[in-house]
Amino acid sequence: MSGKLQRREVLVTGGGRGIGRAIALRFAEAGARVFVNFFVNREAAEKTAHDIELRGGSAHLVQADLKEPTEIKRLIAEVGRVAGRLDVLVSNAASGVLKDGLELSAKQWDWVLSTNARPLLLLGQDAVRLMTAGGRIVALSSLGSQRVIPGYAAIGVSKAALESLTRYLAVECGAKGITVNAVSAGAVETDVWQMIPEGQRALEAIRARTPGHTLVTPEAIADIVFFLASPAAQAIQGQV
């Protein structure tokens, strides 16, 4: 596979940092125009945009709070205004509250679900109007959707909802020639672990139990997302 996606229009939510940044740069290497969505950290998003240009792509920054339905509509409308179409949607933006289920408030629960799960639904509803056959939607999940991780209750449930929604959207979008899939990669070596109590220690413990003592990198995930967005992945639909 040549890896070329020349002139394809790609939207990556949460594209300024971490896994989202790696995904944005992977598409840039193939010559795509990447719409980099961010909410808070403009400096990181601007650096990613600069690096996209250096790697042969073009970048367009769009700030939007994906918890707000009107902001999602504005985001997709901006893509439509600039590009006239959308070839690939990568729903990556996520956040969370690190508490056990019995400690969560209703406000915290709603915040996590509206950040991690609902955006895929609302993004998908508007994005498909800009897509034609061959369009791709890829969501980012985590193992907390299937396994119990201490302090991960709200995030895990939000990712389980996202995976279920992936299957429903895949059935609905399949008739349009659009595929919808999700990627769940387990422990990924990003700066998120620095925000978790004993995070670095936990990461090293996971590394020690992993064959080859290596962890998944953001770049490895980006390669998988890139593959799912390619013509070679046309037969993969509704999978995690």
Image (cartoon, rainbow, N blue to C red):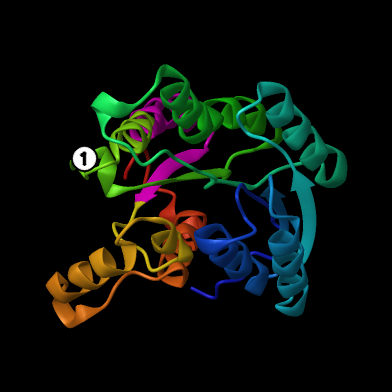
169 drawn magenta: yes
- Segment colored magenta: 162-183
Relative vertical location of residue 11 with respect to residue 30 in this rendering, above or below:
above
Image-based side of 162 in relation to 204, left or right: right
Across and down, in percent, residue 221 comes to 42, 63
At horizontal 56% and vertical 57% (from top left) the residue drawn is 20
Image-based side of 141 in relation to 24, left or right: left
- Element on which disc 1 rests: loop
Q: In which quarter of the image is residue 196?
A: bottom left
Image-based side of 131 in relation to 178, left or right: right
At horizontal 82% and vertical 46% (from top left) the residue drawn is 83
Across and down, in percent, residue 65 comes to 67, 35
At horizontal 71% and vertical 74% (from top left) the residue drawn is 51
> Which residue reaches farthest bottom?
212
Q: Quadrant of residue 119?
A: top right
Across and down, in percent, residue 74 comes to 78, 31
> Which residue reaches farthest right?
81
Residue underneath mark 1: 146
Relative vertical location of residue 43 with respect to residue 4 in this rendering, above or below:
above
**Which one is in front, 165 or 189?**
189
Across and down, in percent, residue 144 comes to 27, 43
Q: Quadrant of residue 200?
A: bottom left
Q: How crowded is mark 1: few (under 14 residues within 10 Å), some or many (20 or more)?
A: few
Image-based side of 97 in relation to 128, left or right: left
77 drawn magenta: no
Quadrant that contains the C terminus: top left
Relative vertical location of residue 149 with respect to residue 119 in this rendering, above or below:
below
**Which one is in front, 8 or 77?**
77
Instruction: Give the residue type that dot 1 points to.
Output: Gln
**Which one is in front, 105 or 63?**
105
